[in-house]
Amino acid sequence: MAKHPGDLLSSLLTLPSPAADDQVLLMDILDQRLSLPKRQIADQVVCIAKLAFSCLNPNLESWRQKLESHGTCRVGAALLRSLYTSREAEALMKWKESLDINPSHSLLPFWRLNSTSAFANSSRSPCKWVGIVCNKFGSIIEIDLPRSNLKGTLRNFNFSSFPNLLKFNISNNSLYGSIPSHISNLCKLIYLDMGSNHLSGNLPSAIRLLTSLRYLAVPKNYLNGAIPPEIGVLESLEELHAYNNNFSGSIPLSIVNLTNSTKLDLSSNYLTGSIPPEIGHLQSLTLLSVANNYLIGSTPMSIGEPKPLVNLFLDRNHLSGNIPSQICHLTNLRFLAVSDNYLNGFIPPEIGMLVSLEVLYAYKNKFSGSIPLSIGNLSNLIDLNLSENKIIGSIPYEIGMLKSVVNLCLFDNHLSGTIPMSIGNLSNLIDLCLAENKIFGSIPHEIGKLKSLVYLSLFENHLTGSVPVSIGQLKSLARLSLYSNNLSGSIFIGSIPSQLNNLTNLDFFQIGHNFLSGYLPENICLGGRLRWLGANGNCFTGSIPKRLRNCSSLMIVLLDDNQLVGNISEVLGLYPNLYIMGLSKNKFFGKLPGNWGEYPKLNVVNLSNNKIIGGLPHELGKATQLHQVDLSSNLLVGKIPKELGQLKSLFILKLSNNSLSSTVPEEIGMLADLQMLNLASNKLSGPIPGHLEQCSKLIHLDLSYNIFSGNIPFQIEICTSLKILI
């Protein structure tokens, strides 16, 4: 008799391989009273028995590989391969059916099961499906479905059906819900990317079981809770990307166990506490980002320990204290961002050791002291921003050694001294911002060498002298901001050089609040791009350049407080994008134009203190976006048009110091947002208008120096917040 089936099963499951002694197996399987079959038949009998019992083996893949290597049993191995393929395919189909798939966009409609068996070398195998990669045995090792328009959850994804999966990429889809803890069944997983979805809930602590994981990315989701301390178990992990989520709590100390990590990005979360000092001991890091969190405390000195760190982002936190000089030992560093914190003290003089540095962001802190002279050693620097600090002293001459710099921003500090002539060496410079300092002296002629310059901001300093002719050589210049250099003394004395007519690409032209004279540049809008024209508070004469009449790109015009002349109905063009029109305190004359309906975006009009005559055009009521109207101190006559009641957004109306007559139209009471109404010094008559009580937000009402009759209406008098001048 042959062996008992139970004993036979035990012996087969413990055999080292299907290549064990077939003769012994054959004797165990067959009735011993029968003679042994011939060799070919014997091999087939043994193979069938092995195939049957291998299906009961929990390590199906191992047995299938052993059968594959056994020549007689290759057909059996193929059958096992089919069994594997079928199980994985069915798991994928079950998940597919649970998704909210848009058939016209998603790739998954190409996933189909057939009723017949699906061998790995068949076109019906899931190994041929989009996004699926199999090993040579037909088992799925990669599921790669980024940007596949998938919408749904992972609730019905049977992770245990994929014991050989190495890569799982479902990034940039619309998957939502939580990450199932049974994702830990992917015991061979090396690469996991679930970024840019709508996943929520915690990062499961069971992720610690993915001990082969080298790449873990869950950025741009809605994951919350603490980063599980179990993350430190993943000692093979090389990259961890968890930015742009809602993680809270502190950075787990166990993260320092990730000694193979090259990239660690926890930015843009709600992390609190301090940066673990031990994090600096991760000697393989090339990227460390904890930016845009709520971290406090000082920057660990250990971050400066020798390592190949290339990118260090500590910005947008609540860090305090000094920048440790040890950071300057990171000679491979290219990007250093410590901006928007509460860091203080000096910028370390050793900063010049960072010879590979390309970007240095240290703005919005409390740094004091001067700019280190060693900064001139940073020959690879492209972007330098030290703005919004308390840095003192002068701009060092060595700044001119930064031949690669493109953006140089030092605004809102306490810098003094002059602009160094070496600034002209920065031939690649696009943005130069030295505004809001205490810089004095003249603008150096060498600034005209910056042929790539697009933005020049020198406003709110103590600059003196004239505008250098060489600025006219900056033909790429889009923004020129020189305003408010009158903090002490007379500045920018003289006229604007005619060479400024060469600046035909200007977008912003801001030269207000100086002592400039002469004429405005004729070609200031020749390129058709000018949006902001600000020359207010100067001594300009002549008329507004005729070419400005066709400058439809204009959004803001500020020419107040000059000596400009011209007929107001002729100097203005059609400006469909205009928001603010400021022409007050000039010598404009003539009647107001009637084309106000052609200024659909106009918010503010100030034509006060001119010599404008005639009546108020009723078309003014068509500029329905107006918030402020000031036509005071002119020579206007006639009635206040009732159409002004159509200006529902109006909150300031000043018509004082004119010769307006008749009564105040009732429609003015329809201006519910009106806060200030000044009609003083006119020839208005009749009773004091009681309908103004409807202007519930009115806080200043001046009706003085008119010829109104009667008393103040009771409804107005009881408005305690209203200041009334009669």
Image: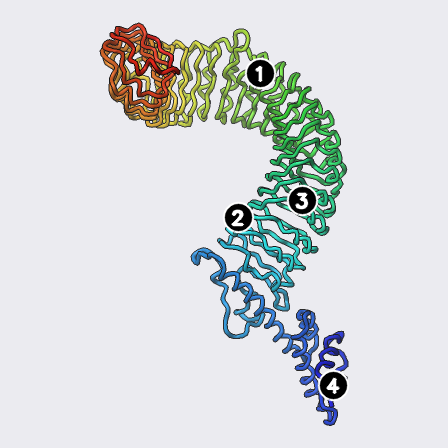
Q: Are marks 4 and 2 in contact (CB under 8 Å)?
A: no
Q: Secondary structure at mark 3?
A: strand
**Nearest to the observer: residue 556 or residue 615:** 615
The mark that comes first in sequence, 2 or 1, is 2
Q: Mark 2 against mark 1, which lies toward the viewer? A: 2
Where residue 223 appears, as percent x and y from the top left, is: 58, 46
Q: Secondary structure at mark 1?
A: loop
Q: Secondary structure at mark 4?
A: loop
Q: Which residue is mark 3?
A: 263
Q: Which mark is residue 444?
A: 1
Q: Are marks 3 and 2 in contact (CB under 8 Å)?
A: no
Q: Amino acid at mark 3?
A: Lys
Q: Mark 4 against mark 2, which lies toward the viewer? A: 4
Disc 2/disc 1 C-alpha distance (Å)? 54 Å
Instruction: Say whether residue 706 is left or right of residue 397.
Output: left
Q: Amino acid at mark 4?
A: Lys
The mark that comes first in sequence, 1 or 4, is 4
Q: Amino acid at mark 2?
A: His
Q: Mark 1 against mark 4, which lies toward the viewer? A: 4
Q: How many marks?
A: 4
Disc 3/disc 2 C-alpha distance (Å)? 23 Å
The mark that comes first in sequence, 3 or 4, is 4
Q: Quadrant of residue 122?
A: bottom right
Disc 1/disc 4 C-alpha distance (Å)? 103 Å
**Nearest to the observer: residue 506 or residue 174:** 174
**Nearest to the observer: residue 531 or residue 45:** 45
Disc 1/disc 3 C-alpha distance (Å)? 45 Å
Q: Which residue is mark 4?
A: 3
Q: Mark 1 against mark 3, which lies toward the viewer? A: 3
User: Against 92, is 333 above or below?
Assistant: above
